Image (cartoon, helix red, strand yellow):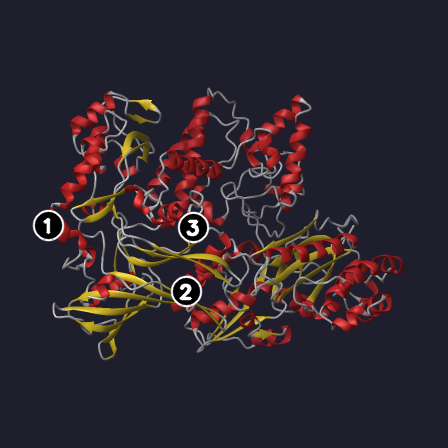
């Protein structure tokens, strides 16, 4: 069993070359296997990352690994001349004080192991490194000892060895990936300085715990603010939400985390959010270093959560104060187990021994207590029906709002599960409580003590494959295997060969790709181009598809005909809807219904129709393929107005990514946009086939101060100075007012005097024209939805063509062409001639009524706003992208 654990990290530029990173990984894997270490090590494939690891093993083996890292950055001459004495000398110099335990309790270096391990260390040191040399000094390693249990047993800290090349060594989904390394080392406080700051802390200082809520529950500093995050990538969102309130009101901000790595980037992000007026510091080495110095005599109370089998390390040798509480009985408790998790989200929940044996709900999902259960077996039908009613009532309370989107999906899945179970069972369960039996969510075994392979999630594919093969040998095994299909790794090749299910998202994506191929929806712009009264328009032939909608709570009880004619523009004629229902063209929950049917909440209504996609202008698209050093390949596309960025809703083939894939001969749905641009807006869109590139630019787009966007616009009106508007020069104004979503269906935003999202836009007049319009340069500080459009309207000079925000249509395509050449009727005539394969199609019968004005290139289809240039800042490096100016800027 391992006797010691080391924790370490270092922000240092390694390489963006995948091959070099894999070579470095292979070298480290050879070394760590030879030293018989277990644990995990993440290697950042970026110039702004580094490495982050923790290993368990014998005292001698870990010292040898430290020697390899400590000597790795030495001069080439010293490394080339390294011998056994070099390694022995390093270990002799650093063996003292390698743990925080008393000297008499330390292990001694084992000479036999040292002799066996030294050749492997030397082999690593003398191997040509595919990455720049660097050193992790002795002080960069945090040591702790694997303390035996009262029975004298040592815990299995890590089940395996795991080394992986990643984009980020602390995952944020790309949100903090662009923070330069030089920003990570600022504001460091030693444990003693941090302790002194806590001793003198007053109301002008804010203490932030950067760890996740689960970690805070078992140990923290008094008076620390808990952001209550479940994952680290939620921390930047918390900062953005609070930077104008609790963060900016403080003169000093202190931050801490487990070992210091999260605070490095978190403090840099907070510093950029609050500005230079606020001092931002973080604890060097994290809680781990603080406890080494102060133990139970400091301000930290409880256990320091660690990401290994121990879970928590107490502040003192005696065990320290218990600050956690059992979620059920509120008894003092600070031990998480794999079996005791929230039945909704699977987040671990503090449950004491006395309260074990049921299902539990975390704080976030406490409102689902009693109506949401994972196991339905063994419950009486009356109880199950009560759950179903409870969930339906609960769904009504979250029916509106983007913030509830994920919760609605979760509840609806559970309702489907309940409905299926009620249908498939007679409901005569004896109510013996079988649904409450405690079982492991990882391996599905009731007898599991929680420390199974699934607890750590390492080698998951291998383990599932092995168990699947074993399960085939016996009938009992086959029964277990059927249960375990639910937790398999869907991307495992062995699983696919054995006929197990694929990931539902993968299945859906494959179906979408095949559908687009079957209907030839990915094609060059010219493929479906038609000349209508001198204007090129892209009209895609109709194709069969099934349209699905789910009945919302507010519509429950409506007649099926009234419901469809009220909410769907292609169903305006009641007689046509009646005929379609009678012919079986409209089904509810997979069954045919009558015209007198009343829709119920959560009903699934499916209609088979011929899809006529809305129109777009068939303007040529300029595409520039560019390789960005350290990032990857990106396509710079000049998007025409009227074209949506990606396939969604009624636009599949008539979308920018589909057209570009067709122009370049790329795989269907291989292109991903790095950001969004309104359908009615023209200009620069960046896209890539590489997910890492998309994440990179998306992170830069959303990071404050990381991108300068420049737009051209044509405004008409008289700008006025008022609240939130100030003149910053001749013919130059800055609008600084928050905006919020006013109408979800139309996407309309508006000014918000309370709440809303902060945003600021500068407008600089380039030229005033005789018709009262102005050519303007727009510089938005953020990238909120419709930001420039709302701010221009509030300024008193809305964008020409932007009818949603008060702009007129002088000279804009949508009205001018339609009036002069009967453009609309020309387009509709072509669409009517393209008959679909479905005889009784409601859309084909009502083409004119099936589209909004802007979908037929009428008012609102394009506005005089053009994204011209994006400049990304990453440290001292600037990445610049630019497309041509729009034709209306040359008029």
Could you say whether the residue bearing mark 2 is in a helix, strand or loop?
helix
Q: Which residue is mark 2?
A: 242
The reply to whether residue 509 is visible in this rendering is: yes
The x and y percentages for residue 154 are 76, 50
Residue at mark 2 to residue at mark 1: CA–CA distance? 51 Å
Q: Secondary structure at mark 1?
A: helix
Give the image location of residue 669, x and y in percent: 42, 44
The first of marks 2 and 1 along the sequence is 2
Q: Residue furthest right?
A: 112
Q: Quadrant of residue 513?
A: top left
Image quadrant holding the C terminus, namely bottom left
Say which of 660 and 473 sits in front: 660
Query: Toward which corner of the image does residue 495 lie, by quadrant?
Result: top right
Residue pushed farthest left? 820
Residue 559 visible to the viewer? no
Left or right, residue 123 beside residue 251? right
Q: Does 398 sit above or below residue 263? A: above
Residue 672 circle label: 3
Q: Which mark, by number, is residue 545?
A: none
Q: Secondary structure at mark 3?
A: strand
């Amino acid at each position: 069993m391992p006797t010691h654990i080391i924790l370490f990290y270092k922000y240092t530029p390694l390489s963006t070359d995948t091959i070099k990173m894999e070579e470095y990984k292979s070298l480290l894997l050879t070394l760590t296997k030879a030293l018989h270490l277990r644990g995990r090590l993440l290697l950042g494939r970026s110039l702004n990352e580094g490495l982050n690891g923790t290993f368990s093993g014998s005292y001698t083996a870990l010292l040898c690994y430290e020697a390899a890292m400590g000597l790795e950055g030495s001069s080439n001459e010293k490394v080339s001349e390294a011998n056994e004495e070099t390694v022995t000398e390093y270990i002799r110099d650093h063996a003292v004080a390698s743990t925080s335990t008393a000297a008499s309790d330390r292990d001694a270096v084992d000479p036999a192991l040292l002799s066996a391990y030294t050749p492997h260390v030397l082999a690593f040191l003398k191997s040509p490194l595919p990455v720049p040399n660097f050193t992790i000094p002795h002080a960069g390693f945090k040591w702790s000892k694997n303390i035996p249990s009262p029975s004298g047993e040592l815990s299995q800290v890590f089940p395996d060895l795991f080394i992986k090349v990643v984009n980020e060594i602390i995952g944020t989904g790309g949100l903090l990936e662009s923070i330069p390394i030089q920003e990570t080392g600022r504001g460091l406080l030693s444990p003693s300085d941090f302790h002194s700051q806590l001793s003198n802390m007053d109301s002008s200082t804010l203490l932030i715990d950067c760890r996740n809520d689960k970690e805070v529950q078992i140990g923290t500093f008094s008076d620390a603010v808990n952001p209550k995050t479940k994952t680290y990538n939620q921390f930047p969102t918390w900062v953005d939400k609070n930077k104008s309130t609790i963060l900016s009101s403080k003169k000093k901000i202190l931050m801490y985390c487990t070992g210091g790595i999260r605070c490095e980037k978190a403090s840099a992000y907070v510093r950029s959010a609050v500005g230079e007026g606020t001092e931002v510091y973080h604890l060097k080495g994290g809680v781990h270093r603080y406890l080494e110095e102060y133990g139970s005599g400091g301000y930290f109370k409880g256990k320091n959560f660690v990401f290994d089998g121990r879970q928590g390390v107490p502040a003192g040798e005696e065990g320290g104060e218990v600050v956690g509480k059992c979620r059920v009985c509120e008894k003092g408790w600070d031990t998480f187990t794999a079996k005791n998790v929230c039945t909704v989200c699977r987040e671990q929940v503090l449950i004491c021994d006395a309260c074990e044996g049921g299902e539990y709900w975390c704080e976030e999902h406490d409102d689902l207590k009693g109506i949401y259960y994972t196991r339905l077996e063994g419950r009486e039908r009356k109880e199950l029906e009560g759950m179903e009613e409870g969930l339906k009532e609960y769904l009504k309370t979250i029916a509106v709002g983007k913030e509830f989107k994920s919760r609605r999906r979760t509840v609806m899945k559970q309702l489907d599960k309940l409905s299926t179970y009620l249908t498939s069972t007679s409901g005569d369960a004896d109510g013996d409580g079988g649904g409450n039996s405690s079982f492991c969510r990882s391996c599905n075994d009731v007898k599991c003590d929680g420390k199974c392979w699934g607890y750590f999630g390492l080698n998951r594919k291998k383990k599932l494959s092995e168990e699947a093969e074993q399960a085939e040998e016996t009938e009992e095994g086959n029964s277990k295997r059927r249960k375990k299909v639910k937790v398999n790794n869907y991307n495992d090749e062995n699983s696919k060969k054995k006929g197990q299910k694929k990931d539902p998202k993968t299945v859906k994506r494959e179906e979408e790709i095949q559908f687009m191929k079957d209907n030839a929806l990915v094609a060059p712009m010219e493929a479906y181009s038609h000349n209508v009264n001198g204007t090129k328009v892209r009209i895609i032939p109709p194709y069969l598809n099934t349209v699905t909608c789910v009945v919302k709570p507010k519509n429950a009880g409506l007649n099926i005909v009234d419901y469809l004619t009220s909410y769907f523009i292609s169903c305006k004629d009641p007689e046509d809807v009646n005929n379609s229902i009678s012919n079986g063209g409209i089904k509810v929950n997979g069954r045919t219904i009558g015209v007198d049917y009343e829709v119920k909440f959560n009903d699934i209504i499916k209609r088979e129709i011929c899809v006529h996609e809305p129109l777009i202008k068939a303007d040529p698209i300029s595409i520039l393929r560019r390789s960005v050093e350290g990032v990857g390949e990106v396509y710079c596309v000049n998007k025409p107005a009227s074209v949506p960025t990606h396939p969604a809703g009624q636009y599949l083939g008539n979308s920018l990514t589909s057209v570009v894939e067709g122009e370049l001969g790329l795989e269907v749905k291989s292109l991903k946009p790095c950001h969004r641009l309104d359908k009615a807006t023209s200009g620069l869109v960046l896209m890539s086939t590489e997910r890492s590139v998309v994440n990179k630019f998306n992170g830069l787009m959303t990071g404050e101060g990381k991108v300068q966007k420049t737009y051209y616009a044509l405004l008409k009106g008289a700008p006025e100075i008022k609240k939130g508007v100030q003149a910053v020069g001749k013919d130059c104004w800055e609008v600084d007012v928050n905006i919020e979503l006013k109408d979800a269906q139309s996407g309309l935003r508006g000014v918000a005097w309370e709440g809303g999202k902060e945003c600021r836009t500068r407008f600089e007049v380039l030229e005033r024209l005789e018709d009262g319009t102005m050519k303007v340069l727009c510089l938005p500080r953020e990238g909120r939805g419709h930001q420039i459009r709302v701010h221009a309207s509030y300024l008193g000079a809305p964008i020409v063509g932007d009818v949603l925000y008060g702009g007129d249509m002088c000279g804009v395509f949508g009205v001018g062409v339609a009036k002069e050449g009967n453009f609309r009727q020309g387009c509709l005539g072509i669409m009517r001639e393209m008959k679909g394969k479905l005889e009784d199609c409601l859309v084909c019968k009502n083409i004119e009524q099936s589209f909004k004005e802007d979908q037929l290139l009428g008012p609102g289809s394009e506005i005089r706003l053009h994204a011209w240039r994006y400049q990304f800042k990453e440290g001292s490096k600037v990445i610049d992208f630019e497309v041509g100016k729009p034709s209306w800027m040359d008029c």
